[in-house]
Structure formats: structure tokens, C-alpha cells
Amino acid sequence: MSSTQDEFVPYKPHAVIITKGPQGFGFNVRGQIDEGGQLRSINGSLYAPLQHISNVVEGGPADEAGVLTGDRILEVNGKNVEGESHSSVIELIKSNMDVLKMVLLSVPAKENDRLDGEAVSYTSDEELEHRSIEISIPSVSQREESGKSVSYYNVYLDGAFLMSHRYNEFHRLHVDLKNKFPYIVFPRFPGKWPLKLSQAQLDKRHQELEHWLKQVCSVTQLFDHFYVQDFLGLVGKKREERVDSAPDNADIKVLLPNNTSLCVNIPTEAYVKELIEAVCTKLNISLDFVPHFTIFKRYDGDELPVPCLPSEKPNNLLVNNHNERNKLKLSFRKLLLSPDVEEGMLGDTAALEILYNQAVSDYTSGLFDSTGKEIELNRTNHVTTQADFVRVAQSCPGYNGVEFPHCACDSRKDGHVILCVSRDHITIQACSKSGEKQDQVKKFSWAHVTEYEEEEEGEFSFTITKGTSVRKIVLTSQHASYMNHCFQLVINT
């Protein structure tokens, strides 16, 4: 059977079943490396980019099943593959041992030529191999060059630093690879911008460069080529050998209470305190107030952000988390402050901005009881009356407090409890094991707390003493360290 597009007249989607022969299914597949892409008109209908049959072995199983060179692949074994990457479609085809079911779309020869021209170039299953490479760009560094601040993107392989490159060096590699491998469809490369980029645009460029590099390095022939190996600093080295000198500085992005982000440049080996100082400096907050703020960390799916430990290095946290599914976000927030300390900070315009925005966020999220204060809070919720808003919020029960996720308690066998810590008092509310609040609530005065400690990993206890009555309460929670930290703040400051 001769396989040309012009022999098939209807040019409509049709199903084929191919039984594997001694030499395989008898066809090759070509198409874009990357996934997604713009819709294209094929035979009068719009489709996402499609992989296609690049060659059919005459007399082979695919030829006998009526597969034609140029057929576009719509489904493989019942799965829609519009916009899928080349490697994904190949994996689906190979996943079936003996029988392959596909839905194909045949196209006229002229249509095939047009689509080939739009796509520029293709990969072939026989030409390219794919493999998983843990390559990433978790951070960006700033360097002063000729009086200008220049961004360098820090490339890591398997969690180890390799090299730092400017955008122009990535672009040069992209051009060189396209010239060297004209038959490969490369993923979209982020374009140049004539004007100075905003922080949002820089973040987008960062993400697009990383996506481009991951896609390129996933192709064995590209990753092993001299151009890429030289770009990564691996020429003459085994993959296990790494460049030891990490970049001196990195850009760290932190979220502010008003949900905007701030980017600061700190040494890669800097500890949390140095990041707090850098944020305060950039926001023009007096460094006298550094002890009253901290950096909180929160992973996707976490119920509660927790303070970073003083011994933690923010850049290391972000680098180690970069390829994880649950992404880490860092935020800049105040600690559990006493009213006197907060009052002293209201005279600092930049510090007031943080206190105000955090109070607004807590108010709208219902983190403190605003009953009877709504009119005053709404009246003062304005940029010109920020200090007044904070003072009204200070008078609300639960303000400047932390409500922890429900956890087990030694004195409650059939349910859990919710611990709330504020400057006013400690509250423990009964709840079900799924966290549904119940009516039983107990409040404890700080004056009656005689002991508290993080007993062992996952356990926190505090002792309430009233006259001759002594009661120890033990909580089992993943937030035991944070509970202990809150008690320290209230009792010692």
C-alpha cells in the first residue's frame, strides 16, 4: 500500500488499530518538543499543535492499517494528545505492548507543506532521546557592571550550583542551538524588551528562562552537546563534578502584608536576620525595629506560616525547595508585639505601613474579634488614618495573636483542641478531630503560666498554677516550636 496524503479523500478524524509486528508498528513520529502552543487551522478546524506521522514503512503494520505520512495524531490509546510534547506522545505509543489505537487526521499534501512551514522544524523519535534532568534556576543575582545593576541567573544541577549567566548568554545559546539543530522545534524563548523591566516582568523572564532550559536539557542530544556542556561549565568534567564557587549574592523575594512582593539582594550565605535588615533598609524602616519583625515561611498546602529559625539561610531554603511540588513562600511580618512597642513604631511611617497592612489583612480574614468595632475600623481604614486603625484594632480581642491548627491534647481523648495565643490571654477551644469548633472554651491568664517548654519533637507543654492547683497541658502538634516561640515572645517582652 502506497502512503500519500492525496489518496485519502475525506480528511476527517478517523480511528486506526495497529498490531505490532517484528519490527515495531512501522512508523515514525515528529513534532514539537515542548507542550502547549498556539491553535492552528487544519482542514478548517482549530487544533492545538499536533505530533504527526513523519514516515510510514511500506508494507508494515501502520501501512496495512491505513496510516498515511503527514497524518496528525489526535488521540493515542484513548487519550487526547493535542498540544502534548513529543516525549509524552512517544511514551503513550510505547506504553502499549502489542496493539495501538489512534485517532488520526489526514491532510492534503499542500496543507501538510503549509503546516511544516509554520512549524519550522521537527524532531523524530529515531533522532532524539529524552531523559529527566534536575536542572533549575532557583535564584537571580545582581552585579554592578559599568555603573549598572545586571541580573545573573544562577543555574543548578541536581541541587548543586553550576554557573551564573546573563540573559544575553542564554539567548546566544538559543541561537547557536537552533542553527546547529535546524530539525528541532525549540521551546519559546523569552523575547528582549527595549525598556527597563518591572519586577513582575523580571519574574516572568526568570520563569520562562528556566522552562526553556529544562526543555532543552531534557533532550539527550542537546544536553550532551558541547554548546550546552560549555554553557553549564561541565566541559571536561563528569556529571558528578560540580563547580564549587556559588554566586556571592542572590535576589530573594518576600511577600508583604498587602500581598505585594519585595525583592532584595543579600549574600547567598546570609541568615534570616540579614534578610530582615535588608527588607527594613529597602522599605526605609528604622533598623531599631528589626527585632520586632521576622521572615515567615509557608509551603503550599500549609495552614499556618511559621517563623524561620535564626539559623536558617533563606537562599538555601529556596534553592532546596525549588524543584519540590509544595512551593515555599517567604513573607515579612511583625511578631507578637506588646501595645507599648507597637505604639512606639507608629511614628515610623514605613513601619506604620507594615503594621497597618497586617492589621487590615487580619481584620478582613477574621483573625480577631471586631464585634462592636466595625464602624470605627471601617471609618479609619484609610491611608490618612492608618495609626488610628491600628489603635482600634489593638482594642479588639484576639488582635496580635496566633490561632494554631487543631491538634491533640493529653486531657482530651475523644477530640482535638485549638490553641490561640495573644498578648491578652491563652485560649484553648475544644473541637472535633477534623477541626470543627465546639462550645467548650477555656481561657488562661499569662500571670498563671509558671512553666512552658518544647518537650520533644512535636510536643509542647505549659503549666497553669492557681494557688495550690497545678495543671500541666501537653499539646502534640507539628507547630510545637512555634507555640514555644510565641510563649517566649509574650513572657519575655
Image (spheres, rainbow, N blue to C red):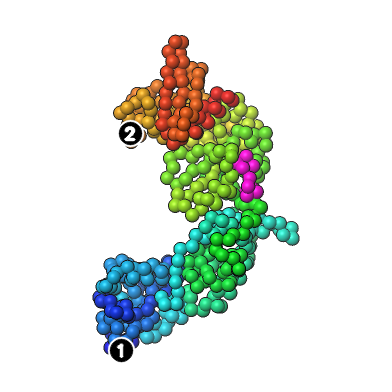
| Residue furthest out toward the bottom | 2
Disc 2 to disc 1, how far (Cα)? 68 Å
| Residue furthest out toward the top | 468
Q: Residue at x 59, y 29 (%)?
A: 342
Q: Residue at x 58, y 72 (%)?
A: 226
Q: Earlier in the sequence, mark 2 or mark 1?
A: 1
Residue 354 image position (x, y, % from top left): 58, 38
**Type of amino acid at the residue the image marks with label 1:** Ser
Q: Secondary structure at mark 2?
A: loop
Q: Mark yes or no: residue 298 visible.
A: yes
Reading the image, the residue beneath label 1 is 2
**Type of amino acid at the residue the image marks with label 2:** Lys
Q: Which mark is residue 433?
A: 2
Residue 106 image position (x, y, % from top left): 32, 80
Residue nearest the viewer, comparing 133 with 168: 133
263 lies above or below 216: above
**How many numbered marks appear?**
2
Q: Which mark is residue 98?
A: none
Relative side of 457 to 14, left or right: right
The residue range painted magenta reads 264-274
